[in-house]
């Protein structure tokens, strides 16, 4: 198994941080993509950065895209044609077909 699409709740905890989550899969050389429209975060709007639940999830997805792996939406099938590491440590998929 080399290509993994991850979905689920609590992207900021379980989906990204578990031993089988985004970070660990990417560290182990797997081609991992977060399906961003099929995930949510555990976030309390009364705490920093004091934004809505939806915005809190968007902020963490931006972090994932910058630091961990690319994301996609469920209406665009990911095809892992050219998977490479970005200069900032994140990853990107180029050559995806829709």
Image (cartoon, rainbow, N blue to C red):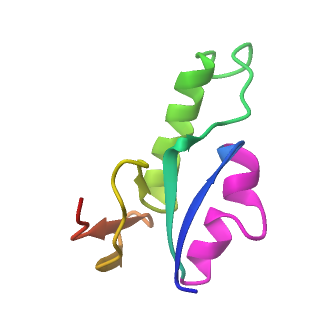
Q: Position of residue 66 (x, y in %)?
A: 43, 53
Across and down, in percent, residue 54 comes to 56, 23
* Closer-to-camera residue (34/55): 34
The residue under the point 25% across, 69% down is 94
Residue 24 covered by magenta stretch = yes
Residue 20 left/right relative to 83: right
Callout count: 0
If the image is split into quadrants, where does the C terminus sit? Answer: bottom left
Where residue 24 sits in the image (x, y, percent)? 67, 72
Q: Residue at x 36, y 60 (%)?
A: 77
In the figure, 10 relative to 83: above or below?
A: above
Task: Identify the image quadrant of residue 92.
Answer: bottom left
Q: Name the dominant secondary structure of the magenta segment.
A: helix
Q: Residue at x 77, y 62 (%)?
A: 18
Residue at screen point 35% across, 77% down: 83
Q: Quadrant of residue 48?
A: top right
Q: On screen, 19 above or below 53? A: below
Q: Where is the N terminus found, in terms of image quarters?
A: bottom right
Bounds of the magenta segment: 12-29
Would residue 49 appear left or right of 34 to someone viewing this image? Answer: right
Q: Is residue 73 above or below residue 47?
A: below
In reply to whether residue 64 is colored magenta, the answer given is no
């Amino acid at each position: 198994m080399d290509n993994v699409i991850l979905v689920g709740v609590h992207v900021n905890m379980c989906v990204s941080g578990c031993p089988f989550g985004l970070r660990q899969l990417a560290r182990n050389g797997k081609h991992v993509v977060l399906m961003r429209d099929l995930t949510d975060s555990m976030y309390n709007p009364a705490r920093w950065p004091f934004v809505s639940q939806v915005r809190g999830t968007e902020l963490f997805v931006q972090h994932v895209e910058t630091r961990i792996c690319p994301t996609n939406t469920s209406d665009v099938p990911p095809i892992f044609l050219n998977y490479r590491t970005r200069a900032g440590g994140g990853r990107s998929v180029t050559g995806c077909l829709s």
